[in-house]
Image (tube, helix red, strand yellow):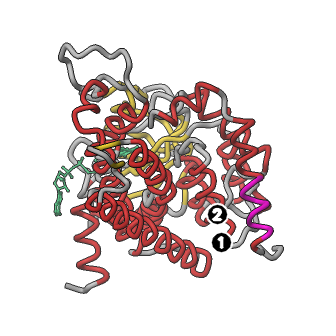
Amino acid sequence: MTEFTKEAEARFRKEIADFVDRSLDEEGRRQVELGKPLSRNGFVEWQRKLVAMGWGAPHWPKEWGGTDWSLRQRFVFEEEMALQGAPHMVGFNTRMLGPILLTYGTDAQKERFLPRALTFKDWWCQGYSEPSSGSDLASLQTRAVREENSYVVNGSKIWTTYGHYANWMFCLVRTDPNVKKQEGISFLLIDMNSPGLLVQPVKHFYGQHVFNQIFFDDVRVPAENLVGKENEGWTIAKALLEHERLATSRHSEARRKLGRLIRMAKQTRYDDKTMLEDSYFRQRIAQLAINVRAVEYSTMRALEKYIDDGEVGFFASSLKLCGVAVNQSVDEAILDLLGPGSLPADSAYNGDIPVAGLVADAQFATEARYYMRGPAIAGGSNEVQRAIISKQVLKL
Ligand SMILES: Cc1cc2nc3c(=O)[nH]c(=O)nc-3n(C[C@H](O)[C@H](O)[C@H](O)COP(=O)(O)OP(=O)(O)OC[C@H]3O[C@@H](n4cnc5c(N)ncnc54)[C@H](O)[C@@H]3O)c2cc1C
């Protein structure tokens, strides 16, 4: 690892800015500007450009295509990518599956799946939630019965983000129904093209297709696709959720949005001054800037813990809570600044206001308002995170 001096940091930031400038096409730039996700192809192409730079999974070990960056360098990378308008990547491949296989996978599983996950030759999805098991995830019912060299899987998963893009799923299944619920769960890797597996869309109320429900009808999964030991999947499930929650701190997204808010406040006039000169709004921006900085420092602490101990622990819960809250409060400040100006951009609004002449800021603000409701629930709802903190951290 080379020393990351101030000069090296400035060079690194410039390298990132140049990379984003030359690598993000017009469509990608537009999507980020409007706060929308890329298309499937857009995600895959972007990831491959990152991989070509050696930046596809900075937190993986170098031998698997990661980096040997210091904590500070990793942090600067995430921050500068967001500031330059790089797309927020989906985390299933590199932030969830990767760390799990690196810790619990066999050598054969690592060799088979990690390189393809890195380059998105495989698109992974997460098969955790079920129609009757969300917050109480350990009550899951999807059943896997061992028959010779296979598991036969029956049941259903729901809220599977981008399940229609995926060709592989990491999945929690019940392998023993006769023990304490946490003790009968296993972690399986399932080929989405297996006979008996059905993907059905679950559309957002405003029409977008992100979620799916997945049905398993006697789906045969080779026993070699079991990660860790049979009936010990709950430990793996929890470790993966910690990685998911760490990624949900979205500190760099909040930093970029704050920049947008400040730019908009400079451009928006009320009476004879800009909103940045308005003492109330100025104070509000200052408080948001303090909160964003606090989440950044907390994220660094969590990364440090991960580097030192190989796990994030319950800290991930508070990080997720604060990160989502900070993002939502910046989104709200942007909406307040726009006032009724954001209404025509509201994709759930079916009134007569013409869509012509919409500004990107208004579209971004309304997208963000809907979008950030999701992270408050995904990976375990805010209420559940509070329950974890009160029990495990505060010992209440
Ligand atoms: C954007 C998004 C993406 C998602 N992607 C995926 C995915 O890819 N794969 C996947 O498997 N799942 C995914 N999920 C599902 C997510 O994990 C669940 O929605 C979440 O765990 C909550 O479960 P539930 O929806 O069944 O709500 P429920 O568990 O039914 O909870 C309903 C309400 O009750 C509250 N509640 C429940 N239990 C308690 C308690 N003990 N104390 C206090 N309050 C409680 C909850 O906070 C919530 O407000 C996604 C969800 C979202 C929003």
**Residue 359 vertical position relative to residue 236 in the rendered view, above or below:** above
Distance from label 2 to label 1 (Cα)?
6 Å
Residue positioned 66% across, 28% down in the render: 25
Give percent across and percent down for residue 157.
Answer: 34, 40
Predominant SS of the magenta segment = helix
The residue carrying mark 2 has its beta carbon less than 8 Å from ligand 1: no
**Label 2 crowd (10 A; few <14 / some 14-19 / many >=20):** some
Residue 30 seen in the current view: yes
- Give the quarter of the image for residue 8: bottom right
Which numbered disc covers residue 349? none
Q: Judge by depth and name the residue closer to the eye, 359 or 55.
A: 359
Q: Which residues fall within the magenta stretch?
A: 7-14
Q: Residue furthest right?
A: 2
Which numbered disc covers residue 72? 1
Magenta stretch encompasses residue 95? no
Q: Residue furthest bottom?
A: 395
Which quadrant does the N terminus fall into? Answer: bottom right
**Label 1 crowd (10 A; few <14 / some 14-19 / many >=20):** few
Q: What amino acid is at disc 2?
A: Val
Q: What amino acid is at disc 1?
A: Arg
Task: Look at the numbered discs 2 and 1 and tell me whether their residues touch, using CB distance below 8 Å.
Answer: yes
Which residue, given by chain and number where applicable, does mark 2 sit on? 76
Circle 1 — which element? helix
Give percent across and percent down for residue 384.
Answer: 24, 63
**Residue 369 vertical position relative to residue 194 in the rendered view, above or below:** below
Q: Residue furthest front?
A: 272
Residue positioned 66% across, 59% down in the render: 77
